[in-house]
Amino acid sequence: MTNRLPQAALIMPAILFCEMLALGADGPFLGAVAAVAEIAGAMIVLWLLRPGMAFWRAFYMPLLAAAAAWAWLASAMMPGPDMFGRVWGAPDLLPSALARFLGGCAVLLASAAVGWRRRGLRLSIDYWLLLGLIQLAVALFLRQSDPNSVWGVDKGFLRDRFTGTFVNANAAGCLYAMLATLALGRGIMLWRSRFAPASLMTQVVAPVALLGGLGACAITGSRTALVAGLAVLFLLAVQFGWTEYRNRAKGNAATVFAATAMAILLVLALVGESTAERFRQVDQDSGLRVEIWSFYARLAGSAPLGHGPGGLEDAALRAYASVNEANMLWFVNSAHDIFLSLMINGGWPYLLLMIMLTGALLFPLRHRQAREQGATLASAIGALAIMLVCSSVDIALDMPGMAALGAMLLGLVWGAAASAVHDDRRNQSVPARSRASTSGAAGV
C-alpha cells in the first residue's frame, strides 16, 4: 500500500491548486463545485490508503467535533419551527454552505490519512510547493497581461495592487507568506539531510518557493501577511540556528543567521513605494478596521445563535445605526475577523464547536514525540499561525480555497503528530509485552 502514497499525497494539493487558480473558489457556485471535487478527492484518497483501525480510533474526537458543528448548521433545515428559536437570514444559501463545510471536512480527513503515513506530510508539502510556484507564475502572467482584472473579473479599487489569482490582495499575501514558510521548513530539512539522496526537483523548488513567496507577499502590499510571515520565518531560522549551535555546528548556525538577515534585506528591497505607502497608512486604516469590528461585534451580539451562513449581508443592511455608518461600511461584506465571522454564521455554539475541532486536531502536539517531527511539521504549524493572524484582521478564511488550505495543513499536522505518538506508544509496549512473556515462561 506504500506505493500508493505519492498518488494519494498529490490529490488534495492538486484540487486546492485548481481552487486557487479559480479565484480561490470564492462565491456560492465556485464554492459548491470545489466542495464536490474535495469530497470526490477524499474518497479516492481513502480508497488508495485504506486507513486501519488505529487511525480511526485516533481520529474519533475530531470527527465528533466536526459532525457536531455540521449538525448545528444543518438542524436549521428541519421542517417546522426551529427548536432553538433561530431565525436565520438567506435560508436558500444554507445547503451550499453545508456542502462547503462537508468539503472542508473531506479535505481534513483525507489530509489526516496522508499525514498518518510516514512520508505523507513531506510529500504533500513538496507537491504544494511545486504547485504554488506554478500558481505564482500564472498570477504574474495575468498581472502582466491585464493588471486591472483576474480572468476578466474586475479588481475594483484594488487595481493598483498585485492580487495573485484572487481579487483580494490581502488573501493573496497570506497565501504567499504561507508558501514561503513551508518552503523554509523543507529547505531546513534538506540542509539537515544534505548527505542523503533527495530529488533535484525538491532541491530546486524549496529555495525558489522561499524567495518567490517572500517577494510575492511583499508586492501584494499586505502588511499583516508580510509582518506575520517575516516573524514566523525569523522564528524558524532562530530555532534551526540554535539547534545547530547546540550540536556544535557553529558554522552552520552563523550561515543560517546570515541567510536570514539577507532574506529580510531582500524583502525590504522588494518593498516598493506602493507597499511602503501602505505602511504609512496604518493609522488611518486601523481606525476603519476598528469601526468594522465594532459594527460586526454589535451584529453578532444581536443574535447570539447567529444569523446563519449567508445571512451576514442581509442582517448588516438592517443594522446600520446611522447614514454615516452606512456610507462608511456599505462595501464591507465581511467581519474581517474569523471569530466574529463564526459567531455571525452560527452563534456561540458554532464558535465553540469550531474551537473544539481545532483543539482536537492540535491536541497530539502536547506530546514531545509529536513535536520532534522536524522543520517540515514546524513550518506547517507556522503557516497555520500566519493564516490565523491574517484571518483575525482580514478575510483570508472567508475564501473557500484558503479555508480548504487551512484544513489540509491541519489534517497533515494532526496525522504526522498523532502517528508519531501512536508509534511511540506501540514501541514502548513491545518491551513490556516481551518482559511479561518471559516472566510467564519462567513461572514468575
Image (cartoon, rainbow, N blue to C red):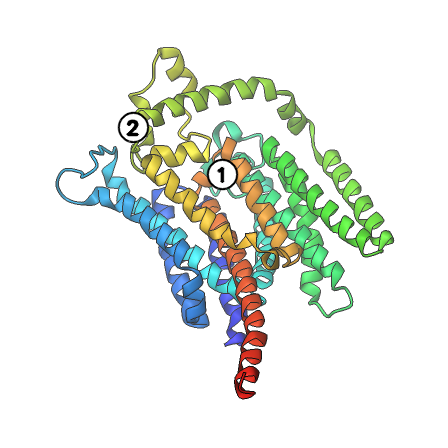
Identify the residue at the far front of this view. 444
Residue beneath the point at 34% across and 25% down: 301
Q: Which amino acid does label 1 sit on?
A: Ala
Q: Nearer the viewer, residue 342 or 30?
A: 342
Quick one: SS at disc 1?
A: helix
Which image quarter: residue 55? bottom left
Which image quarter: residue 331? top left
- Residue 332: x percent and y percent? 42, 26
Identify the residue at the far right of this view. 251
176 with respect to 17 (left or right): right
**N-term-proximal mark, 2 vs 1:** 2
Which of the numbered marks, if any, corresponds to residue 396?
Answer: 1
- Residue 23: x percent and y percent? 46, 44
Q: Please, is residue 310 above or below residue 410 in the view?
A: above
What residue did someone put label 2 on? 303
Q: Which amino acid does label 2 sit on?
A: Ala
Q: Nearer the viewer, residue 378 or 171?
A: 378
Q: Nearer the viewer, mark 2 or mark 1?
A: 2
Whether residue 16 appears in this view of the structure is yes
Mark 2–mark 1 CB contact (< 8 Å): no
207 with respect to 443 (left or right): right
